[in-house]
Amino acid sequence: MTHRILIVEDQADIRKLIRMTLEFGDFELHEAPDGESGLNLARAVRPHVMLLDVMMPGLLDGYQVCRHIKQDPQLRQIQVIMLTARGQAADVAAGEKAGADAYLVKPFSPLELIDRVEAMVTSAAST
Amino acid sequence: MNDAFRLLFDQVKSGVVWVQRNGNVRYANKAAVQLTPCMLGRAFLDPMVDRTIRSAGQGLLQLPFQFEIRTDEIHPDTVRAVLLPAPVGNDLMLVLNNVSEERWYTQALENLIRYIEAEMAKPIELLVGDLQAMEAPGGALHRVSDSRLAVNAHDLSKKLGKLSDLVKVFGSGAIQRDDRIEMAGLVRAALKIVSAMLLDRNVTVTLAEMHEEVTVYGSPEWLTRAVAEYLEHVVQTARRGSVVELSLTGTGTRAMLRTRNRGLFVSNHDRRSAFVPFGVGDGTGQAQERIGMALARYVVEQHGGSVRIEDEFESVDFVIELPAGAPASQDGQLSVEQAQRYARDMAQLMARSAQRRAAPPKTAAGGTGPAS
């Protein structure tokens, strides 16, 4: 079964690198450039895993999108990996508070990213 | 005049007036109306401007023609006017710029900033430290509780601190933080800061609308300061006993903090000088009042936003607009670092991919989508 992955990231270069990384796996990839369209796409696509940038322009940043996802009974099963350039304890805590399932600090290892995503979709499939 | 021109002229900071060769005004943008009184379909009320336009209309002046006018106010400003042919047709255009503000900015403020940097930064720092020591348990302030010296020193420290802050934010790159800030909390904190002034002036702030989720990125300290200064200005300009409506909203990519003061009138002079620290032509007693809004504006501008005064028929709105969320920037350095990590891992990713292709297919686990 092909798992759906949603990449929400405002920097086009980073988005492209994530896509290139995940293309080594067997995933159906979707992309959004900001929080609001990311949330709308999540509702439409129902991804298994969402890669979510924290700092994005617009009314919904990564934490807010994550909070919306985890508060919505229809969406809360989506596994959320927060992507951020800031890896301080307070930032990680804010991600946890928003309900994030994992946290990757940029620049992240593509191997680690794909391993995390695969582990998440495997555990989702087994439950 | 077509709508495209109208739209364009409504966006520019300079005053723009489109006039017929007989001197009748066909269009004037908002900035122009604030600089010199004029009415559509009529000649300019300022006889000097009217005469100049008519002369140009009769071909007696070579265009573009530059001249200066003075605003009709107690503290008049000098306005540079340039008369030139309209981009289409046979009409004329008058472009107006307030040069009093420009001169002030380029000369007085720069001199003042240099002076403060050189002469006042250190004494302010020492004074703040001394006051803290005096206020500590057993300090001199506890023994002489009503010390006039201490009160005056506090007052001076506050005023000088404002000047010092103004200097700091003037320096480029003074605000480089990108902390996540929930604006509703920040506005409440700023309201607490001005609560004494609200009581003193018997001004009530009602929350008309408060979008709790509105988030911006920047310096919490400086933005709190900016919003407090902005609120202080709003309270100072409000009549005693009046009610001010405050709203915080988020739309699209903008966060908007608005205070609406019904029945307030802001003169053109006040409108222009509100953002100029120390005012233009104001008495020394009011100088301190003028610093706050300028400080607020510089801080907000360094966050990519703007502070402005908008007026409707029955109310005046003081507006702070900020970009919602993180600033839209392409971090080139981060992209390069991420690309380097990708290049480093690519060989392993390719090897893993090849191994998978070679391996026999696994039996499907039969999982379903998370929310399908």
Image: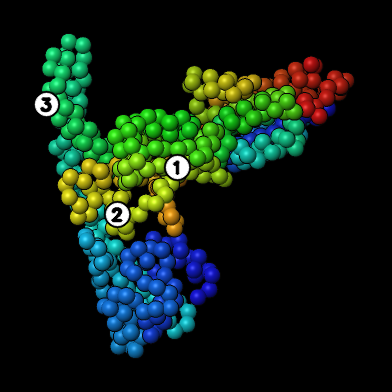
Instruction: Please give left or right for residue A101 compared with residue A107 in the image.
Output: right
Q: Chain of mark 3?
A: B
N-terminal-most mark, 2 or 1: 1
Q: Residue at x 64, y 30 (%)?
A: A68
Amino acid type, callout 2: Asp
In this view of the protein, which residue sits in the foreground, B41 or B108? B41
N-terminal-most mark, 3 or 2: 3
Most extreme residue toward the front, as rendered? B241
Q: Which mark is residue B137?
A: none
In this view of the protein, which residue sits in the foreground, B308 or A86? B308
Image marks 2 and 1: residues in contact by CB distance under 8 Å: no
Amino acid type, callout 3: Leu
Q: Position of residue A56 (x, y in %)?
A: 55, 37
Image marks 3 and 1: residues in contact by CB distance under 8 Å: no
Quarter where residue B127 is shown: top left
Q: Residue at x 59, y 24 (%)?
A: A98
Most extreme residue toward the top, as rendered? B138
Q: Chain of mark 1?
A: B
Amino acid type, callout 1: Glu
Residue A28 in view of the camera = yes
